[in-house]
Amino acid sequence: MHPDRIRLPRLRDKVMSAEEAATLIHDGMTVGMSGFTRAGDCKAVPFALAERAKTHPLQITLMTGASLGHDADKVLSDAGVTARRMPFQVDASLRKRINAGEVMFMDQHLSETVEMLRNRQLKPVDMAVIEATCITADGGIVPTTSVGNSASFAILAQKVIVEINLSMPLELEGLHDIYIPTYRPTRQPIPLVSVDQRIGTPAIPIDPEKIAAIVFTNRPDSPSTVLPPDLETAAIADHLNDFLMREVKANRLSAALQPLQAGIGTIANAVLHGLLDSPFQDLRMYSEVLQDSSIDLLDSGRMTFASASSMTLSAGCYERVMANLARYKSRLVLRPQEISNHPEVVRRLGLITINTALECDLYGNVNSTHVNGTHMMNGIGGSGDFARNAHMSIFVTKSLAKGGDISSIVPMVTHVDHTEHDVDVLVTEHGLADLRGLAPRERARVVIDQCVSPLYRDALKDYFKEACRRGGHTPHVLEEAFAWHTRFRETGSMLSRDMMLAD
Amino acid sequence: MHPDRIRLPRLRDKVMSAEEAATLIHDGMTVGMSGFTRAGDCKAVPFALAERAKTHPLQITLMTGASLGHDADKVLSDAGVTARRMPFQVDASLRKRINAGEVMFMDQHLSETVEMLRNRQLKPVDMAVIEATCITADGGIVPTTSVGNSASFAILAQKVIVEINLSMPLELEGLHDIYIPTYRPTRQPIPLVSVDQRIGTPAIPIDPEKIAAIVFTNRPDSPSTVLPPDLETAAIADHLNDFLMREVKANRLSAALQPLQAGIGTIANAVLHGLLDSPFQDLRMYSEVLQDSSIDLLDSGRMTFASASSMTLSAGCYERVMANLARYKSRLVLRPQEISNHPEVVRRLGLITINTALECDLYGNVNSTHVNGTHMMNGIGGSGDFARNAHMSIFVTKSLAKGGDISSIVPMVTHVDHTEHDVDVLVTEHGLADLRGLAPRERARVVIDQCVSPLYRDALKDYFKEACRRGGHTPHVLEEAFAWHTRFRETGSMLSRDMMLAD
């Protein structure tokens, strides 16, 4: 019965099948599950719950750290189990239900979900379902490849179901640093002052009596689906490297830069890969998720330490890390997402943050979430936690999407996740716009010159010219502001006949 | 020569006229002036500089804490002196130049200006011009009715001009708490854990050799222009009081609530006045500016302590406070605006923040700055510093403006300063929308039911209905999203003939 995995003997009679554990979850419950960007998610209970719902229909509010792997969000929403969902998701099937108004989705800053729970501003968590490496002798839960919101879910929930994943090496113990902010009104400063500092405990401390079930699993995380760098993402990485080198030369940054944060995804991964061939040294990462590129930077010696809330790796990289945990553990730490993303720590450490924009406008406002202003893609994730308090907030995007039918640089974004106030630098494959210290009209000129695709440049210039003729601090032609988007909706392309002829 | 005002004897030969001091400011300089919401601004040098520009034209980048009094922004921009301006202003004449694209205005979060200066991401301050109560024996500058950015301007500038205002009582000494965050990479936590704590020094510590000129003045601050509560602002205050009482009853807040922040202006002032007749006790304020209402709450005993960066009072209230400083000093503190507005402290203390929206949309996105999406009103000020990290972020607005020709609740805001993620509660004279934990479609229904004026309610319902028919997580009809705004631009009213008939 794996005494090394359940070290508190009296908990061993809580072991049961996923099917039995799933019966502890009832209609109307709020369930907090582990899982952050496909890492450390539960591999058994969600599926048993979906199966059970076929004969015993039930609906729950599902909270997680961030996205789940193994199609868990698809399976749960297809089974009609997910009535409400927060704070993030990436599943095509769930997304469809969200956009149809069938699932109520709360798109939240990732640092805020447990803060709101603790303040009793969200309905309390009835049941936590947490993937673990093991349970310690005093009943503490050692997470696996992510911490996410697991610690606070387990601490705040009435009852906890633990999934012990036997595929996770016991050497994961000691990788995590569980620190939960003290309660108000006597909340103390978070003592973290450097990326590699440990301020908490290696396991989630809970009353073991709350553990209602223990389920064994043996399935690895879903591998990352990030694509390798291409010509455009490589060009983005080059522009950013050149810019950072100029900042070092101007004595605004040291050769170690500032601690880096990078959002998940193909572009951010490519940008980090670009640092492999850079002159920077002793890089550090303070991010929410580590991708292959972070591990490659550690392996190369160019990065000395990485702090995050999860590791989301390709199959090969995952195996490499799991097989060499002893070697990585001195240079890696996984923290609760409210600490990895905490405004206090982000401002104090002075991060350079690199996040992906879905679209960006003339003035530097960024849409990270809504396709054509209405349809949710994934969610804001941690980008707002980081961009708002960064030392330098960088957004990256390819200038075009859908083979040129969409320009990522538009006259006005159809949804704002990051305001002009929180966007310092914008990069596309064409160039880099340094927006720091510029007024809106100045920003517009730099964005047009540096970032927009030549396919759309003249049209954007014309828009800006007419907008300036009308006047204002942030000139716009309101009745034309979304003309590209409505054209896309009607014709399948933002390009007009004129724009195509001009090209 | 006022030895009690200049206690470091060797500085006394720096005394000169404002006209002489103004000659120290040259074309192309970046000048950091004291002044925050009309309080503690310089009363002589700005005017001497504008006068001098008539014969010796020059242009500067002007940074302040926030807005200036005594029409200084008008005088300086009319004289062509202000080429660039940050981070905030409220002057009609300057506003006109900003909206014409003649003055480059950087609308910044108030906590970030000195952070960016310190990070060398803005051009350095050449000259600081700081109003003072006195200069201490070791050359420290004691501010007057605001701290704002004065401390960092004086510390970072090459040279400092001090305006000693003899109308400011010497008893102001000891009111201020000057704390500047330590430098990276060894930045320490800001040790502030309660509203009434002092963590710094009573004077701005600078090298006295940097003091290039001392000018005496004798003019009080411009009085506040806030209007008294009216029926609508009183209704907003009542809705908010009722809501807060329900939160106390539900055990989500104590009777002391959480520390309060309130933006400047008539509505926020009325809301705070409403607390005079509330059942709450031992209230505390952690805000950027104190208005009459804060002083009245202290006088009534309902509030025990108030922390801010400035005091902007009516003439009568100003006299009362100045004549009784000894009595108020134990219950008041003025801090640098980067500390009053610091994300680290705001999140730690758990503020209830109350800020004014210019317009708000169906989904809770707030425009604080841009009239009809293009024309700058004042600036975002500290609202983003507070709303983003608040325990509870509340926005208030009257449902109508311009006698009903403008609805403050619109299908889509034309400019976003605060995203749906950072808006918990919206209040108009009609009611209160508690948006916490709601998905966008749910929020829209609450906003329509509670907040919009009956004049516009049916039209907003119709918009939402058609938007939902088209689908999406955040349903919109893009080509109609700004129809009310374009109608206002063309006809002077957002009301259509149909809407008027329906009413």
Image: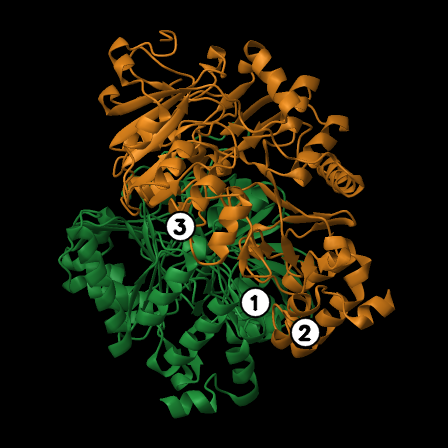
Chain colours: A green, B orange
**Does dot 2 land on a helix, a strand or a loop?**
helix
> CA–CA distance between discs 1 and 3?
21 Å
Report x, y in % for residue A88: 51, 61
Disc 1 target residue = A48
Q: Nearer the viewer, mark 2 or mark 1?
A: 2
* Residue furthest front in the image: B55
In this picture, is B133 found above or below B405? above
For this view, does B478 lie left or right of residue A253? right
Disc 2 target residue = B467
Q: Residue at x 42, y 64 (%)?
A: A38
**Does dot 3 land on a helix, a strand or a loop?**
strand
Can you say which quadrant of the picture contains the N terminus of chain A?
bottom left
Q: Nearer the viewer, mark 3 or mark 2?
A: 2
**Cβ–Cβ below 8 Å for labels 3 and 2?**
no
Indicate the amino acid at tag 1. Answer: Ala
Report x, y in % for residue A195: 29, 44
**Does dot 1 land on a helix, a strand or a loop?**
helix
Q: Residue at x 55, y 13 (%)?
A: B325
Q: Chain of mark 1?
A: A
Name which quarter of the figure residue B34 lies in.
top left
For this view, does A236 lie left or right of residue A499? left
Question: Could you say which is closer to the camera, residue B40 or residue B259?
Answer: B40
Indicate the amino acid at tag 3. Answer: Cys
Report x, y in % for residue B309: 49, 29
Q: Residue at x 31, y 27 (%)?
A: B20
